[in-house]
Amino acid sequence: MKQLATRAITYLVVALLFVCAVRFTPELPERPAAGVLRSPVSTHIDSAAAMLAAPAPLLSRTERLERGETLIGLLKRTGISEESARALVRAATASAVDTRYLRAGMSVEVTADSAGESPRELVFHLGVDRLLRMVRSDSGWTGTEEKLAWKTDTVVVGGTIRASLYQAIDSSATPYFPGRAKDELAWALADIFEYRVDMSRDLQQGDRFRALVERLVAPTGATRMSKVLAASFTLSGSEVSAFRFDSKYGKPSYYDATGKSLRAQFLRAPLEFRRVSSTFGMRFHPILGRWKAHKGTDYAASAGTPVRAVGDAVVERAGWAGGYGNVLQLRHRNGYVTRYGHLRGFAKGIRAGARVEIGQTVAYVGTTGLSTAPHLHFEVLVGGVQRDSRAALRSISGVPIEGSERSAFESLREQLLASLDATPGVVRLALR
Ligand SMILES: [Zn+2]
């Protein structure tokens, strides 16, 4: 009897010591960057008796692979023995990890007992949507690769133009479209409005934009642009809108508020917005003094950038012409001619008499003739007279939506408009 009591007291003392150890063990302080992510088993213990039955508490933390570090190095850093680390890396390699392609910064979640010596589970974050979960059992480590689902949601962004579309998106959409997704959004908007707005030229300080955008979000927070559902620009007080509508008669495309396709006879710019150097802006004028009075428009872009035909046309001229250097002249319908100067060269098959389609690559940006830096000199002539391309290429005549689809379009437009007017942020969208 006395022996039993002694044993009970011993148990109790051991248990209390253990509780103290758990409670006061610092949270794996080796690296300031690493943090305790979660404790799958609660470390909160109510009584010593409960402790006797409960398994040892587990702790998780995240480590990041450092530049030049091996996986074994990282694992040893977490307190795993060299031998277990090697066994683990062997198993991980057999499962999915190609150690040759591990990137610095890859995070590894390690779940181990409180002393950190005996790991139970490791999660390798192989990519934004891919992870490898290694679980230890009596027979060793087994790995399962998991594909993480991207979530789709819808966001309203809106802002005011101060310097450029990039700047406006940067200052208003960054929380929702981090990193490259921001540029993708700018390019998508430029593409949607490419028949109506030259995003590198037409925006003025104080102009505004709004967009209702579907995006993909990975569990890691990585974000991708999916598609623009609706957008509007208020340019010098006048509004141009775009609504994405999936017509039975073609691919989903964009229509303005009146139901006319945004497609038109001419593209507003001979270079894709994403190709135009934003650094030069409106002030850039690389031509010598005597060219200052010209009615053309200059687009700064790197040499070799593809130049596109702004409309269906026949090539009128493709060759050298003094100050223009290599110049291309296209004849369109209704007496319109477009001229592209300082070209490095012409696209394959471009010669006088050749037919070209709207958007087709016809030449490449260069700095031939009277030019001091690579740029495209672009002119529009109507009836032989130089015109301001901004005015000359302005067209609002798109093909109207089919009569049979009109009511479907209008009800979609109303729903999109209501969402577009919502406070910027993630919105709930109940379409169809
Ligand atoms: Zn020029």
Image: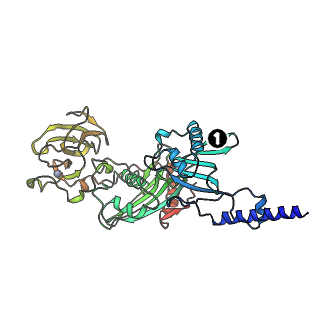
Q: Describe the colour scheme in one phrase.
A: rainbow
Which residue lies most toward the front here? Answer: 2
Q: Nearer the viewer, residue 299 or 9?
A: 9
Observer able to see residue 55 = yes
Measured as percent of width and height from the top left, residue 178 is found at: 44, 57
Observer able to see residue 233 = no
Side (left or right) of 316 relative to 10 = left
Count neighbours of disc 1 (C-alpha within 10 A) and say few if under 14, some if 14 to 19, many if 20 or more: some
Measured as percent of width and height from the top left, residue 110 is found at: 59, 52
Residue at horizontal 49%, vertical 54%? 214
Residue at horizontal 20%, vertical 52%? 298
Measured as percent of width and height from the top left, residue 362 is found at: 26, 39
Which residue lies most toward the top here? Answer: 349
Tag 1's secondary structure?
strand
Q: In which quarter of the image is the N terminus?
A: bottom right
Does 349 appear above or below 15? above
Residue at horizontal 58%, vertical 59%? 37
